[in-house]
């Protein structure tokens, strides 16, 4: 991105036409960066409640004072209640700052709390689990650029610019997808509403919300019955294939069609199109993970990719070299990786519903109850960085109550967001153009060894501070030593960002400090950099390689058989409300931009026109949508892209105070409709954040 600066202010941003990945592309939200940095409402100093009294008005203070106050409270709470009473949460904007995840986790470890949360567990935790449970290929998946088929299940990268490995890299995704189709690639999309990606599909399957396992099970039935899978690969690398084959044996395309709501011929066609192609991938986005049975869906997707051997082989280049990621630096071989324990024995458990940690993270859906449930380990202090729990977490009413119950709620947020309003302390962070960063978070999406270092364009205004420094200061005040993967950092003075990043990314292919030095010495400082020497070629398997995919591990594939035998019941909540992303917001980011508000003032509830007619609701009318838990108001919009019986609506709008009169100004939060215990996945803790059973009440 190119940035215009006048004095200490950013005035404009533009795409960098010389960047070969983006070719000058920017999104509408990115182009609002100058507005977002310069908003008069932005916090340039911390705010704390007057005299430390809950609910009292906010007064400004200095960052140094506020950090001391936070550390004093943490010290007192640990002394009285122990370390688990302190929790940290990292939301989407914590991921945007290259040093925050690493530093915040080091702080949680130094405190000794199990209560470390990130937005991953209200996003796609089943992918994390499935990789650990069913096996991972050391050579990585087939690349998009070389694939002959890609199937997107509930993933709309044309708008979200997100896709797992093997899907379309989210740099000019529309152009890439059209180019790939022009060279012959086939695109299959499964989504209850015909998304922008669905518009480009060769085969579009309008699956019923939450019934992806049926669609995928029907495809596996056809692929196995017709012998379209890769027998050699299965024999060499897969355990549990027979159990899988058995589980889908009687699940005919007709049965699958009935359950998934997709014609049987389309299921057969999708199976053949996918399996007959030489290279390809099935990927999922957020939709199917959130629609209940996320782990089962991800298992079925894994099974499809595994039995069709959708992996790069010896002699191929690695699909995603990920130059800044330590875990990507290991050997690349055409074999299954050793098991990587991520859950279960040896991992801390929540006091709520017996749900355990997934890797380093406690699942977000238990956070509210961990705050509200008395007893040993009850959370008393929460530091939330760059996230907005009040509108992003399931069960809004409970989350708000929990945030208000905390002895101290610290929100690191440049704006008075829905969650910031509930805070006792708001810390004012510097923003992205005011700090140096590397592109570590976007590495998994690059098929090339691409690195980017960006200098701060302007100094941090007022008394704002980079969040990793805030975390360091809290540790310093508590007398704690931060331990990073590369060793301890100095606790004498704040380490500079590259020193911290080198410690965090220890063992990665290109050290962040080297990327910085290379960038500053290059002809185009701050521009795109490629490290072709870091792009590994996959080696043959070790002669004694013994690890195999485990398609029969744990509850699988029995969980599919249970699912197939169950009959969905009508319960009076006959619509399914599904999530979608919009071009004009990034979750709740952008609600404060005048420009984006004009472009999109609310989050409409999109219905099939026939459903609106049957309900007797006019296009554009305000309606009430009720679940078993609560209700919200929204504008009904007719769209023939949406399946009948489905309401398609963006999350992360509104706040807990929003009612009927606020529809056109702040919108409504779909998370108010969700129970945080309903249908909770026993492993990931995920609840229904899509495919929510609701009914329509005329308002
Ligand atoms: N029902 C339902 N629920 C969902 C989803 C869904 O599809 N359906 N999606 C889920 C997903 S995928 C995710 S990732 C989560 C998101 O969950 P969160 O990350 O908790 O929510 P965001 O809305 O992204 O929070 C962004 C916050 O960062 C603040 N912010 C903006 N700029 C900056 C900055 O520069 N620095 C800092 N420190 N803060 C900043 C904003 O003001 C806002 O308060 O929501 C999940 N919730
Ligand atoms: N513009 C924009 N970009 C974003 C974001 C944003 O808010 N705005 N958020 C970012 C974040 S945090 C994330 S995690 C990524 C997510 O990236 P994506 O997962 O690509 O997000 P969506 O665009 O919501 O696409 C999800 C699709 O799933 C469909 N869906 C819903 N329920 C079901 C179901 O039961 N089955 C099937 N098959 N499909 C279903 C929806 O209709 C939708 O088209 O996007 C990121 N990019
Ligand atoms: Mo997300």
Image (tube, helix red, strand yellow):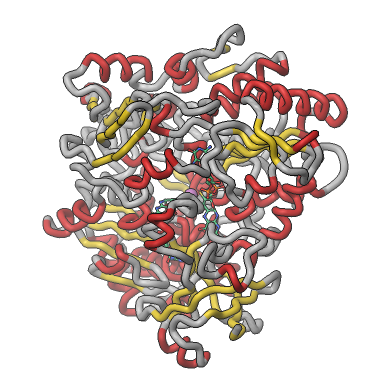
Q: Residue at x 37, y 62 (%)?
A: 599
Furthest residue in direction top, as rendered:
492
Q: Along the horizontal axis of the image, is 349 left or right of 123?
A: right
Q: Is residue 279 visible?
A: yes
Q: Along the horizontal axis of the image, is 83 left or right of 362?
A: right
Q: Quadrant of residue 13?
A: top left
Q: Position of residue 479 (x, y in %)?
A: 71, 13
Q: Along the horizontal axis of the image, is 507 left or right of 48?
A: left
Q: Quadrant of residue 400?
A: bottom right
Ligand 2 shows up in the quarter that is bottom left
The foreground one among 74 and 38 is 38
Q: Position of residue 651 (x, y in %)?
A: 52, 61
The N terminus lies in which quarter of the figure?
Answer: top left
Q: Position of residue 207 (x, y in %)?
A: 42, 73
Q: Position of residue 31 (x, y in %)?
A: 32, 46
Q: Is residue 226 above or below residue 526?
A: below
């Amino acid at each position: 991105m190119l940035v215009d600066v006048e004095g200490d202010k950013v005035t404009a941003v533009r795409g960098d036409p010389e960047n070969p990945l983006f070719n000058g592309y920017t999104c509408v939200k990115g182009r609002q960066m100058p507005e977002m940095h310069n908003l008069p409402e932005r916090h340039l100093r911390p705010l704390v409640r007057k005299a430390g009294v809950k609910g009292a008005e906010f007064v400004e203070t200095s960052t140094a004072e506020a950090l001391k106050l936070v550390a004093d409270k943490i010290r007192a709470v640990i002394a009285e209640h122990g370390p688990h009473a302190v929790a940290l949460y990292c939301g989407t904007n914590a991921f945007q700052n290259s040093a925050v995840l690493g530093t915040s986790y080091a702080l949680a470890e130094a405190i000794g709390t199990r209560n470390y949360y990130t937005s991953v567990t209200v996003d796609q935790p089943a992918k994390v689990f499935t990789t650990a449970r069913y096996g991972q290929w050391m050579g990585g998946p087939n690349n998009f650029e070389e694939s002959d088929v890609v199937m997107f299940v509930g993933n709309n990268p044309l708008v979200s610019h997100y896709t797992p490995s093997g899907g379309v890299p989210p740099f000019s995704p529309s152009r890439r997808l059209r180019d790939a189709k022009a060279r012959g690639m086939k695109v299959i999309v499964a989504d209850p509403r015909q998304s922008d990606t669905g518009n480009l599909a060769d085969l579009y399957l309008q699956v019923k919300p939450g019934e992806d396992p049926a669609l995928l099970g029907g495809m596996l039935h056809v692929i196995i019955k017709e012998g379209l899978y890769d027998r050699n690969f299965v024999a060499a690398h897969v355990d549990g294939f027979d159990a899988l084959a058995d589980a889908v044996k009687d699940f005919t395309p007709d049965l699958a069609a009935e359950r998934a709501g997709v014609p049987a011929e389309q299921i057969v066609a999708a199976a053949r199109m996918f399996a007959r192609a030489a290279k390809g991938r099935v990927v999922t986005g957020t939709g199917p993970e959130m629609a209940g049975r996320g782990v089962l869906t991800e298992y079925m997707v894994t099974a499809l990719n595994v039995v069709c051997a959708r992996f790069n082989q010896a002699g191929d280049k690695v699909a995603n070299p990920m130059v800044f990621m330590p875990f990507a630096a290991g050997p690349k071989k055409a074999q299954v990786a050793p098991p990587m324990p991520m859950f279960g024995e040896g991992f801390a458990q929540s006091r709520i519903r017996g749900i355990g940690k997934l890797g380093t993270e406690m699942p977000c859906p238990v956070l509210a109850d961990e705050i509200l449930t008395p007893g040993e380990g009850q959370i008393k202090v929460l530091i939330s960085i760059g996230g907005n729990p009040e509108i992003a977490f399931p069960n809004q009413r409970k989350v708000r109550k929990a945030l208000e119950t905390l002895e101290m709620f610290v929100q690191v947020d440049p704006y008075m967001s829905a969650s910031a309003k509930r805070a006792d302390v708001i810390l004012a962070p510097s923003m992205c153009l005011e700090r140096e960063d590397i592109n570590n978070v976007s590495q998994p999406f690059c098929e090339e060894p691409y690195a980017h270092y960006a200098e701060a364009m302007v100094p941090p205004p007022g008394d704002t501070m980079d969040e990793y420094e805030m975390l360091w200061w809290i540790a310093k005040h508590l007398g704690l030593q931060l331990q990073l993967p590369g060793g301890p950092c100095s606790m004498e003075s704040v380490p500079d960002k590259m020193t911290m990043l080198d410690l965090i990314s220890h063992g990665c292919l290109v050290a962040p400090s080297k990327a910085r030095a290379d960038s500053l010495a290059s002809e185009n400082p701050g521009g795109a950099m490629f490290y072709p020497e870091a792009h590994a070629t996959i080696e043959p398997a070790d002669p004694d390689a013994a690890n195999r995919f485990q398609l029969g591990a744990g509850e699988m594939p029995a969980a599919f058989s249970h699912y197939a035998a169950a009959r969905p019941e009508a319960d009076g909540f006959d619509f399914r409300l599904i999530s979608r992303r919009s071009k004009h917001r990034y979750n709740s980011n952008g609600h404060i931009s005048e420009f984006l508000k004009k472009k999109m003032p609310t989050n409409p509830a999109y219905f099939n026109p026939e459903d609106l007619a049957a309900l007797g609701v006019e296009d554009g009318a305000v309606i009430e949508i009720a679940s078993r838990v609560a209700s919200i108001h929204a504008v009904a919009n007719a769209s023939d892209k949406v399946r009948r019986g489905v309401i398609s609506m963006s999350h992360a709008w509104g706040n807990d105070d929003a009612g009927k009169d606020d529809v056109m100004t702040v919108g409504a939060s779909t998370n108010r409709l969700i129970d945080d215990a309903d249908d909770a996945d026993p492993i990931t803790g995920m609840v229904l954040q899509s495919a929510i059973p609701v009914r329509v009440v005329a308002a």
